[in-house]
Image (cartoon, coloured by chain):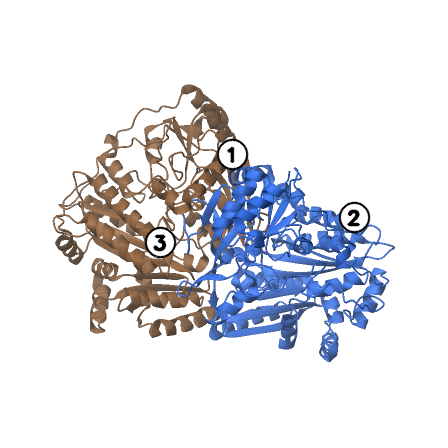
Chain colours: A brown, B blue
């Protein structure tokens, strides 16, 4: 089991969320001067140090796990693997949404589990679930703890004691079938460790979401993740050949590679089940040879609609790049302001010179076999040019690539400086995308305008399909220090209503969690919810599996 | 609603199964002399005319539909759309498996529905299902009637009256969203009509199974079909963006294009549900521009393992052609014998001259944008050559293409001449494929050897995936005229046990139906069956939806 660094309690990354010595505005140099000036002016924001409370001051209620239950768990897993110490519980409290961070920074860990247990096998997990079902103990699976939708913090309507089932002990490669391009892994394994093991055989997995450094493979499956290269390699769903789901009623072995018509797809029921049906204890994943060519480059469109139209045209011809990321004008401008150094300055100058000062940047990445990559690039480049794009070259592509995981680190610094920063995402058909884009921006702006200042709403399309694409919104506003949670909840509610009304999906790759659950019925209909409930009742009759998440009460 | 020819009652095609005047052996020239000689010698078969009984002699029990039920259905759908005449009932009796054909040819239509109804909308279908649920009338959805696994002929354990719900009135394009590459269609529409409508816009759907002329789009969805080009365009599953499922408990609208992470995939529960959860009343399908290049060609491998290894290598690099079809030595030999004309003779000579007289033929097809197709072909051809293949040229590819739908027509003629002809299929990982291949062939040969003669078992791999491929077996033997059903059932049982034991899936694209249902539990496990049952109980509490199919009792 490779050593995997744990996320810090109050933010992102393995280091403490906040440097012990902060400068005056708390930002710790996270913004260029130009960006700081821009945000100050646009948002009406006064940079101010708003550091989190020291970790030792975080409030944690005593464990409610009954002694008899603890004894039963120890009997099952051994004393080492049943933990009720403060550190263990704090580290498994909630995920990494803005609301999670606000609570943790403010010193609130009321959503921490009463204990943390670490099963080592499918059999142990199944026995654990049966025992918890009998004892009335709620079970929340814990992978990387990176949920941004409250996936780890549902409220049990019966307020039963809760344990986090940490999958860290099941985090290694179990088998590698090279001819069948398939690897069998434990759910607690993370992307970097998997890539390292596969790399030795000249293979790669290639699922690279922004949370890649910390999220687990089991978590990707439970939430139907998509990665930055998912346009090319496919969504996580597409990469799962099979999985094992331990439930309170027994163990399900799902999926039959390469494909089957033997009844409805039960594997698809486990994917996206977010811990509500049981715990994923093993995964069979599709791997591929390391691409012999990786080429990333930047392009610029004059307008967002022109960019969308060009990508739609590539999509229908199956000519989309493996990585595709079209930023709207607001995101493009912000990215250019945030980027320091001479390179960024030169790029800004060059864009202005070509009349693209307020254009929309597109980053594309191509991977695969040289001849085929070249032909795809040639065909796509010609269509991009026809669509009005100008090529900015590899430097822009490589720059994006080298910063691809930096977002959540920067967010911590902006939070330190008094800003509100959160993201949300959806997907829609090419026909509906423009309306979804407009509606969400309008809803966020109306909700978050304070003292005459609008929030900054930055958007990109980052996953292309023949039928549509995803939209990812990043919102930055001056934080309401009196009611910060309320400030965001109101905006989120307005944005979610708006995107559903315009034809977007509730979530493209963040999952439902506790945060989106009130809208699930609008997404799948009342009878759809009933079907999910029927499945849950069969597998988890006592409702111990992650209640308060996914399914509405 | 375009005119769609109906299948004949006792065989394939719109014409009667058997010419009124047969020559001496019943074959009506379906075999070349060389093929006839080969089969006679190998199978110990004596060609003999065994024509079906005249249609007017087929035995049909009187309709058991109670008058009150018939009145209720007429009130709902109108008298024109509730039919109990002999012709209507006979035409919806069962599907087109060898067992179906044996029964119908022998004059048995005991599995015919008691009535045929034709709803026109989702709302009518939902009302129909609610009414039937109340009245205790079993409902079997009827699309093209092409099931080869008993999908239309399950036995209701309660022996209730049964109606076929024919979807022919819901068989047109409802909407076409060109920018989103999405078409909305009725479930009763067939491939040719859809291609015709899409062709006017320069679009294609591209799902081309052997049953293409008669099968319906709703049927493809209900059975998780795969087409001859599914390696390239994807399985039917992959092409469904959404669907409407009318159930006795209400209507489900499933799927959210282009993709969603809003909980488990409920669309995947409807796909492959084979009418057991309700009736599919609308489909949203992904369409694509007509390819500007289509290139089909033949290759030859010295051995089957060499062919598999080369395809596996293409698969891992995402370099498989859009159509891929590798025949084993037995199928290659039979195809060459069956092919008449000077071209086939020349090919046989050329193969012998190159030492490939007993080799394995590969047909590949490439479709898409010219530059990209060229690059893919170049890269793949080089790997095929490295794998020991020699190129036979376009004539072989085009010849396959022009005969792609002929199999079931030929079968009728062979049945007329006293042969047993049936197919079965599975899929397995590249690692398991060779064992599955050997096991199934051994099981079929052991079961079907008669009087010292083995059956002819011909196999091809026709759907390639990174993780594995499908195997399609065609079996020809001298028919046991005394116990023909028993002869095949015994062989099928042995083959199914063998393929499951070797790691194959119960079915890759024919579905479960009544025929595979005893093995479903081995495929998905007892708890998997329980999950399906829980879903069915929620949507179809009275169990009126296609009982006797998919789920074991």
Q: Is residue B380 above or below residue B241?
A: below
In the rendered image, residues at marks 3 and 1 fall on the same chain: yes
Label 2 CA crowd tier, 10 Å (few <14, some 14–19, many 20+): few
Of residues B95 and A13, the one drawn nearer to the viewer in this rendering:
B95
Task: Give the CA separation, mark 1 to mark 2.
Answer: 38 Å
Please state the horizontal and vertical placement of residue B361, each as a whole percent of the image: 68, 68
Label 3 CA crowd tier, 10 Å (few <14, some 14–19, many 20+): many
Please state the horizontal and vertical placement of residue B25, each as a whole percent of the image: 84, 66
Label 1 CA crowd tier, 10 Å (few <14, some 14–19, many 20+): many
For residue A319, side relative to residue B442 (left or right): left
Residue picked out by circle 3: A503
Which residue is outermost to the top?
Answer: A68
Please state the horizontal and vertical placement of residue A275, each as a whole percent of the image: 43, 38
In the rendered image, residues at marks 1 and 2 fall on the same chain: no
Q: Secondary structure at mark 1?
A: helix
Residue picked out by circle 2: B486
Residue at image coords 41%, 49%: A192
For residue A348, side relative to residue B355 (left or right): left
Task: Give the CA separation, mark 3 to mark 1.
Answer: 32 Å
C-beta proximity under 8 Å, tags 3 and 1: no
C-beta proximity under 8 Å, tags 1 and 2: no
Please state the horizontal and vertical placement of residue A208, each as a whole percent of the image: 40, 53
Disc number at residue B308? none
Residue picked out by circle 1: A538
Q: Secondary structure at mark 2?
A: helix
Residue at image coords 81%, 68%: B22
Of residues B395 and B311, the one drawn nearer to the viewer in this rendering:
B395
In the rendered image, residues at marks 2 and 3 fall on the same chain: no
**The residue marked by circle 3 belongs to what chain?**
A
Mark nearest the camera among 3 and 1 is 3
Residue B21 falls in image quadrant: bottom right
């Amino acid at each position: 089991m490779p050593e995997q660094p744990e996320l810090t309690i109050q933010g992102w990354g393995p280091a403490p969320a906040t440097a012990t010595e902060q400068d005056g505005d708390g930002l710790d140099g996270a913004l260029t001067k130009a960006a700081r000036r821009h945000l100050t002016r646009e948002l009406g924001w006064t940079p101010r140090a708003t550091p989190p409370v020291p970790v030792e001051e975080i409030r944690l209620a005593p464990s409610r796990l009954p002694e008899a239950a603890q004894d039963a768990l120890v009997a099952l897993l051994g004393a080492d693997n049943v933990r009720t110490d403060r550190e263990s519980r704090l580290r498994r409290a909630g995920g990494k949404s803005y609301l999670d961070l606000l609570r943790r920074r403010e010193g609130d860990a009321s959503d921490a589990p009463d204990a943390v247990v670490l099963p080592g096998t499918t059999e142990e997990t199944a026995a654990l679930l049966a025992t918890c079902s009998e004892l009335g103990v709620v079970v929340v699976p814990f992978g990387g703890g990176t949920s941004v939708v409250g996936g780890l913090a549902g409220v049990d309507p019966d307020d039963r004691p809760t344990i986090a089932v940490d999958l860290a002990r099941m985090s290694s490669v179990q088998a590698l079938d090279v001819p069948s391009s398939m690897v069998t892994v434990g759910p607690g394994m993370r992307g970097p460790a998997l890539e390292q093991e596969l790399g030795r055989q000249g293979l790669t997995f290639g699922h690279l979401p922004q949370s890649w450094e910390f999220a687990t493979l089991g978590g990707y499956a439970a939430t139907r993740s998509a990665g930055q290269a998912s346009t090319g390699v496919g969504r996580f769903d597409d990469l799962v050949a099979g999985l094992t789901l331990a439930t309170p009623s027994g163990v399900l072995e799902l999926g039959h590679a390469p494909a089957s018509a033997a009844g409805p797809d039960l594997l698809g029921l486990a994917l996206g089940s977010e811990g509500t049906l049981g715990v994923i204890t093993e995964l069979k994943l599709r791997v591929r040879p390391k691409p012999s060519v990786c080429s990333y480059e930047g392009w610029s469109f004059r307008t967002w609609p022109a960019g969308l139209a060009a990508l739609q045209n590539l999509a229908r011809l199956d000519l989309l790049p493996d990585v595709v990321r079209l930023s709207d004008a607001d995101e493009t401008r912000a990215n250019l302001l945030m980027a320091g150094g001479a390179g960024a300055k030169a790029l800004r100058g060059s864009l202005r010179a070509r009349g693209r000062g307020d254009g929309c940047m597109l980053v594309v990445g191509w991977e695969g076999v040289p001849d085929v990559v070249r032909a795809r690039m040639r065909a796509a480049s010609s269509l991009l040019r026809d669509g009005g794009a100008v090529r900015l070259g590899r430097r822009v592509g490589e720059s994006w690539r080298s910063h691809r995981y930096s977002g959540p680190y920067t967010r911590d610094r902006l939070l330190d400086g008094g800003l509100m920063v959160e993201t949300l995402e959806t997907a829609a058909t090419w026909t509906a995308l423009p309306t979804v884009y407009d509606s969400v921006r309008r809803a966020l702006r109306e909700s978050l305008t304070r003292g005459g200042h609008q929030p900054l709403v930055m958007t990109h399309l980052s996953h292309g399909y023949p039928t549509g694409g995803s939209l990812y919104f990043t919102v930055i506003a001056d934080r309401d220090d009196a009611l910060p949670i309320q400030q965001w909840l109101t905006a989120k509610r307005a944005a979610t209503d708006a995107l559903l009304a315009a034809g977007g999906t509730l979530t493209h790759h963040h999952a439902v969690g506790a945060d989106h659950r009130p809208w699930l019925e609008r997404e799948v209909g009342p009878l759809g919810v009933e079907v999910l409930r029927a499945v849950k009742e069969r597998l988890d009759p006592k409702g111990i599996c992650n209640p308060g998440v996914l399914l509405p009460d």
